[in-house]
Amino acid sequence: MCGIVAYIGEKNCVPILLEGLQRLEYRGYDSAGLALVKDGELGVYKKAGKVAELVRSLDSMNGTLESTLGMGHTRWATHGEPNDVNAHPHWDNSKEIAVIHNGIIENYQAIKTKLLQDGHTFSTATDTEVLAHLIGAMYEKVGDLCSAVRLALSEVDGTYGIVVLSKRHPDRIIAARKGSPIILGVGEGENFVASDAAAIVDHTRQVVYLEDGEVAELTREGFRTMTIDDVRTEKVIEEITFDISQIERGGYEHFMLKEINEQPETIRDAMRGRLLVDEGDVMLGGLQHVMGRLLSARRIIISACGTSWHAGLVGEYIFEQIAKIPTEVEYASEFRYRNPLVNIDDVLFVISQSGETADTLAAMREAKRKGATALGIVNVVGSTIARESDGGVYVHAGPEIGVASTKAFTSQLTVISLIALMLARQRGMTKEDGVALARELESLPEKARQLLKNTEMIKAIAEEFKNAKNFLYLGRGANFPVALEGALKLKEISYIHAEGYPAAEMKHGPIALIDENMPVVFVVPKDAIYEKVISNLEEVRARRGRIIAVANEDDHEIEGLAEFVIRVPRTYGFFGPILNVIPLQLLSYYMAVARGTDVDQPRNLAKSVTVE
Ligand code: AGP
């Protein structure tokens, strides 16, 4: 949701912090701020709007800001509207301590009431300011910053990723996490804290991932970690694998367009070192130790949110048709609260690009509590879901900066296909059948590359319909979730209302919407139910709906039926969504560009929803 970056060392940290915040802005943004400790003073500078607004306000100040100890924050509001006052950092009552925070303090009202009774005065509506005051109150009691943070956090319910500075302690940073990621960056004579490695990868690749319930104290010389109860913990220093060029836009106008065009490579990367084509088999190291549980599973449950939930819906077709394992899909936000009938015989796959989505993490924890084996299909290495799962598979899509998920989705589908093929071969699929599927999977990156060359038709469609008020997306079978995903993409970046629906279901109500003003996108590959979808398409034509078809290259019948045809290469039905979604990603992108919306950071959205 929000972005955190902090520095302690010998350099002027202001440019380091501002650049780090700009790298994190996609994670959540409606205000930003810095806190700097220098010469016994604690300066706080914060501004509503994007990081650029903060930079402008700092530039307008007299003299240049300098400090060797500081922290920065970009905020996505959860309590209190986005404005200068509610922006982080927040002071304690004494204005000697500053706090930045990702997450939600659920019992902040009760804490605030007690602090008010103790004479504290507050200037904001935020839960974070209450936490800052609580830390300050504890500091007054114990006189040690790290102890004060631990004592305060022991009274807190909710989630947090925090960094704390004090003007009385120019030699240290305190950080802590519970439910919101915190990474320590280890340097030479300098150390960092961040909510995402992207903020510090320019300065160090040596990182330490804090676990929930851990607190860290960093100095210029090093760091130590402990639990809330002051029990020392030992940490492993790990290496960041991606480089900064993967984060930069690479010449594309938007991160989203770059990531759509990366898909031939990212689909290939999802299979790299895992797909054994000549054996018609798959090797997934992260699942070997749970293979017995997987093969004996009564059923597979998939739980996720948003685009990842759509990947789960496709996964149901893939697991049942390839691995022959009963599979059901659940919204994570529903699953976590409905006391699901889950037990040791079940395997839960949670799908998450960020690996930090609160509802998905909670769904996984609930399934584990009930004895199920919980496995992650995750993009961000070292993320909470990845580390708390019983195993899983990284999708290796690289950093996905655009808030609208694209390459992560097709990589999720690719990984699901690998898992299904691996299970199918373990459950008796012949080598010959396995080789056929493996070869088709191996052909997908090139098919995606070919598909991405033909964007002129998609740009023309976007220009034609950029002022549409509504869109309907229709598909059947494994392409019904593709219709849902196409609709979500359009909604979230162009702000046009769009609905995905099973093609046959359209006549049970939504057909009332069809007239000459309603663009209807059909995902209609030449598969076993092609004729059925054509019947649905005819029903729309009969009511003068404007038809856009995503159809195979060798489908000539469609020319006479649809006003616009976007061509996609043929593949097996259950692999089709990996290709069929790409034109819909591009359509939503060009519609958004035509409408002038903020493609990479759409209004109201955040890249990782780490709150309920
Ligand atoms: C997708 O375009 C959206 N940004 C959103 O629905 C996202 O898929 C959802 O929040 C789940 O995120 P996750 O994959 O990181 O868990």
Image (cartoon, grey):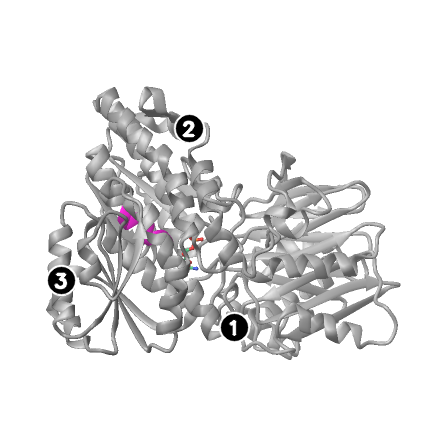
Ligand 1 location (quadrant): bottom left
Is 286 or 337 nearer to us in this picture? 286
The amino acid sitting under disc 3 is: Asn
Q: Nearer the viewer, mark 1 or mark 3?
A: 3
Task: Say which residue label 1 marks.
Answer: 79
Q: Which mark is residue 319?
A: none
Q: Spatial distance from mark 1 to mark 3, Cα to Cα?
A: 46 Å
The amino acid sitting under disc 2 is: Arg
Task: Say which residue label 2 marks.
Answer: 274
Along the polypeptide, which appears first: circle 2 or circle 1? 1
Could you say where residue 273 lies in the image, as x and y percent from the top left? 45, 27
Task: Say which residue label 3 marks.
Answer: 536
Element under label 3? Answer: helix
Q: Nearer the viewer, mark 2 or mark 1?
A: 2
Residue 515 can be seen, yes or no? yes
Which of the 4 image quadrants contains residue 460? Answer: bottom left
Q: Nearer the viewer, mark 3 or mark 2?
A: 3
Chief secondary structure of the magenta portion? helix
Element under label 2? Answer: loop
Q: Are marks 1 and 3 in contact (CB under 8 Å)?
A: no
Is 287 or 545 nearer to us in this picture? 545
Could you say where residue 27 lies in the image, as x and y percent from the top left? 55, 60
Q: Is disc 1 surrounded by few (<14), some (14 to 19) or many (20+) residues within 10 Å? A: some
Q: Is residue 335 magenta?
A: no
Q: Spatial distance from mark 2 to mark 1, Cα to Cα?
A: 44 Å
Residue 375 can be seen, yes or no? no
Q: In the image, is residue 317 above or below residue 49?
A: above
